[in-house]
Image (cartoon, rainbow, N blue to C red):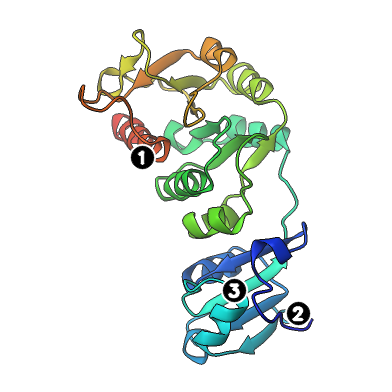
Amino acid sequence: MRPPRQSQLRDRFLREDQIVIEGRFAVSRALESGYQPELILTTKETLHALPPTPSKTVTEILSRLELSQISGYDFHRGCLALGQRPQPTRCLESALDRLISNTAESWERTVVLLERIADPQNLGAILRTAQALGVRQVFLSNECADPWSRRVIRTSMANVFASPPIISDDLFKVADHLAKEANVTLVAAALTEQALPIDAFRPPDTPLALMLGNEGDGLSRALLDRAHVTVKIPVRDVSDSLNVAVAAGILIDRLRTRRG
């Protein structure tokens, strides 16, 4: 595979089946998760900090200036990887089986449902936070941002490789199956008068599904109607809401703390 030149790793030059991973930490995490890029471009100093690369991966050592020229951006942090887009994960049945058969504590079976999260940075931040705080599975509606875009990969610090989200054409069906087949308590996050302040919520001894919606419109009525409980983070009157990625981090942590 010939290394690209002259800003050919800008998004508009990529094929639909290609992805770019930026930065030593992100490339390292992707490799450690089993991803096999076609090409790694790296400085000599960064190469020594990377995990062993697959035998089929082409590696070329370049200067930081050359990396910037190829990338089209100046925040590559000494390393770029190019590879095939992972195949979408859509197997709801296997995820349900894991929830039902898992004998660990209920918190270990907490999942997150994201509906129409449009901003790639928000999606990446939520995926990173979910992985860090022990959430094993994230479900996305197909209207969410592309989880394999370079911005989501970068913002998630490549945690999207460690636990790939399941993309669903019908998030309502996912919620129904979780509730009926795996005895999951559906927890909606919404700023409604009926919503319970998160500190007042006592999670039941069942798996939980935290549902978060679009940055502007929130959750759809269909998902709100399916929720067993609706929670919110009380904020001061001078601010009407929190960024969805920030809210996700607070809610996941509070739910985890309530579980002890």
Instruction: Indicate the position of residue 160 as horizontal and vertical percent values.
Output: 57, 53
Residue at screen point 55% across, 31% down: 113
Q: Indicate which label's residue lies in the foreground, 3 or 2.
A: 3
Q: Amino acid at mark 1?
A: Val
- Numbered circle sitting on residue 246: 1
Q: Nearer the viewer, residue 118 or 95?
A: 118
Query: With respect to residue 211, does 43 lie above or below?
Result: below
90, above or below 184, in the image: below
Measured as percent of width and height from the top left, residue 93 is found at 72, 32
Q: Is residue 53 visible?
A: no
Q: Which residue is mark 3?
A: 71
Give the image location of residue 99, x and y in percent.
58, 33
Residue that appears at 59% across and 57% down: 161
Label 3: which secondary element: helix
Q: Nearer the viewer, mark 1 or mark 3?
A: 3
Q: Is residue 22 left or right of residue 168?
A: left
Which residue type carries mark 2?
Answer: Lys
The image's mark for residue 106 is none
- How far apart in space, not on screen, are marks 1 and 2 (Cα)? 39 Å
Q: Amino acid at mark 3?
A: Ser
Q: Which residue is mark 2?
A: 56
Where residue 83 appears, as percent x and y from the top left, is: 71, 68
Q: Residue, x 35% and y 30% (percent of image)?
A: 255
Q: Alpha-carbon neighbours of circle 3 within 10 Å: few (<14), some, or many (≥20)?
A: many
* Distance CA(mark 1)–CA(mark 3): 29 Å
Say whether residue 234 is left or right of residue 143.
left
* Label located before the other in sequence (1 or 2): 2
Residue at horizontal 63 percent and vertical 73 percent from the top: 81
Q: Secondary structure at mark 1?
A: helix
| SS type, badge 2 | loop
Check contact, mark 1 vs mark 2: CB within 8 A: no
Which of the two discs, 1 and 3, labels the residue nearer the N terminus? 3
